[in-house]
Image (cartoon, grey):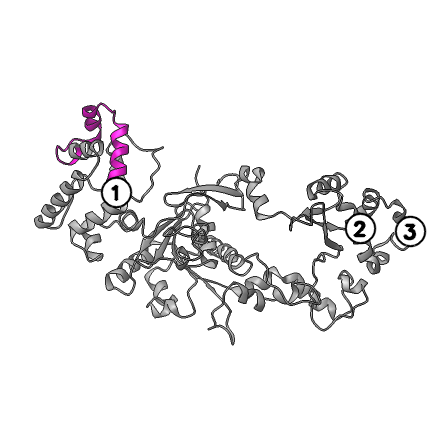
Amino acid sequence: MSKALQGVKILDFTHVQSGPTCTQLLAWFGADVIKVERPGTGDITRGQLQDIPNVDSLYFTMLNHNKRSITLDTKNPKGKEVLEHLIKTCDVLVENFAPGVLDRMGFPWEVIHKMNPKMIVASIKGFGPGPYEDCKVYENVAQCTGGAASTTGFRDGLPLVTGAQIGDSGTGLHLALGIVTALYQRTHSGKGQMVTCAMQDGVLNLCRVKLRDQQRLAHGPLKEYSQFGQNIPFGEATPRAGNDSGGGQPGWIIKCKGWETDPNAYIYFITQAPVWESICDVIGKPEWKTDPDYATPPARLPRLKAIFNTIEEWTMTMTKFEVMEKCNAVDIPVGPILSMKEIAEEQSLRDTGTVVEVDHPKRGKYLTVGNPIKLSDSISEVTRSPLLGEHTDEILKSVLKFKDNEIAERLGMELDQYYQTIQDASSHKMFSYEDLPSKDDVLSEGLYERTPEPAENVEKEKFMQALAKAIESLPEREKLVMSLYYKEELNLRETGEVTRGGPGRPAALFRRTR
């Protein structure tokens, strides 16, 4: 099955969280995301919040699935030359550098557009044009400047930021939509364009209901806020609403059985007007259905605290899941407070691909979130994040069509040093053997030429010396296959006949040890 964004090449200059969120989503939909990283260090989050020494952190792995990693020193002329080739070849460049970094690298929009008129350049910044456009922004700064913090928390407490990454991940999701939109426009305009998304703007878009309330406040108190029912005056700005529902239906987080020891033994309960009579029945207050103090939403507003106290007396006799079962049976909207542990263990989320188990060559198995957007004809598969520079050789060959000697030159290496580097790197790579060909077609992917094509005889000699040394270091089975292939010049089918393993097994061994 083809992927929705199959064939789209993304040049990923992002780091930390906002940009990687965007490019990971595009990768899940099938785009070839080439993550450009600094040699030796890579994305800073590889080393942040590490739970296992010398292993990429979960911070990094959970934001960089389905990508390929190439290491480039863009301050080096040869590295910059490779970057120029990639710009000319790719469809989209995504970056979330501090303001002005891309310009200082020598790649402002005008230069990129001239090099590749079809390229889309997508950027995340903290602020849009204005007095703060040159300021750096991180998650909590975005939440504060985008209006979220001032309206989060309880009326008599401090402003609060939320653990949901509405600044970083929220803006990354906005940018992904912008990129896909620009790609669609390019299908009939033939031109690339700039796509920008400011974190302040992204947070505000997610907080639009609070901007709505700010305007409503000019015409009188906000009657759905619990402070109205408590006769507490409103100020000039949208207040913090605690756990009030934002849709005009009073809601509250209340205790369930076990709350004394379980910090998540709570449920969100909404006293929705259309099901008020059902609420009265389940909590054992049928008289409230006709009591003029409780029968209508306006009458209930000054009594919300007493109402929820009564509901809580009922919910405290059951677990949150038992409450949910009883309420759902009569269409009362409730939401149990699910911990991350409960979410991680929920089988239905595994079944839908919302939570995914991934295997990493150094970390082992770990859980991550999957694609929240499901397409019926483009099924998302979550693959592990790349090791630093894991695909440098592969990208240079398959995307830019460089020969071995060209790569070695750009890396500042002798050819034998380059081959030794490839051999060392291969031990850290993982391959899928499910669809391996059984013939020399394995070579058609640009992994290696059947016969090396060095520019000069001296390079060929160095190559053969390095190759012989590398073959000698292999386990016996791999050594036999590689010797027959390179020294005796047998093809993989002939090698399979000699080793009595059939053609498929030598192909697999060749792919693994190349």
Which residue sits at x=20%, y=32%? 476
Point out the frontmost of discs 2 and 3: 3
Residue identifier under label 2: 273
Q: Is residue 197 magenta?
A: no
Question: Percent position (x, y) of residue 450?
Answer: 19, 39
Residue identifier under label 3: 291
Ranked by sequence position, the earlier of labels 2 and 1 is 2
Q: Nearer the viewer, residue 159 or 314?
A: 314
Q: The residue under label 3 is which amino acid type?
A: Asp
The kind of secondary structure element at disc 1 is loop
User: Given the current orientation, which residue lies at the most extreme front position?
Assistant: 261
Question: Percent position (x, y) of residue 232?
Answer: 79, 68
Residue identifier under label 1: 447
Q: Nearer the viewer, residue 271 or 19?
A: 271
Question: Percent position (x, y) of residue 343?
Answer: 58, 44
User: Magenta stretch?
Assistant: 485-514
Q: Nearer the viewer, residue 308 or 273?
A: 308
Pick the quarter of the image with the N terminus.
top left
**Number of dots carrying numbers:** 3
C-alpha separation, residue under disc 2 versus residue under disc 3: 15 Å
Ranked by sequence position, the earlier of labels 1 and 3 is 3
Q: Is residue 135 above or below residue 191?
A: below
Ranked by sequence position, the earlier of labels 2 and 3 is 2
The kind of secondary structure element at disc 2 is helix
Q: The residue under label 2 is which amino acid type?
A: Ala
Q: The residue under label 1 is which amino acid type?
A: Leu
User: Given the current orientation, which residue lies at the most extreme bottom position?
Assistant: 131
The kind of secondary structure element at disc 3 is loop
Q: Is residue 492 magenta?
A: yes
Q: Are marks 2 and 3 in contact (CB under 8 Å)?
A: no
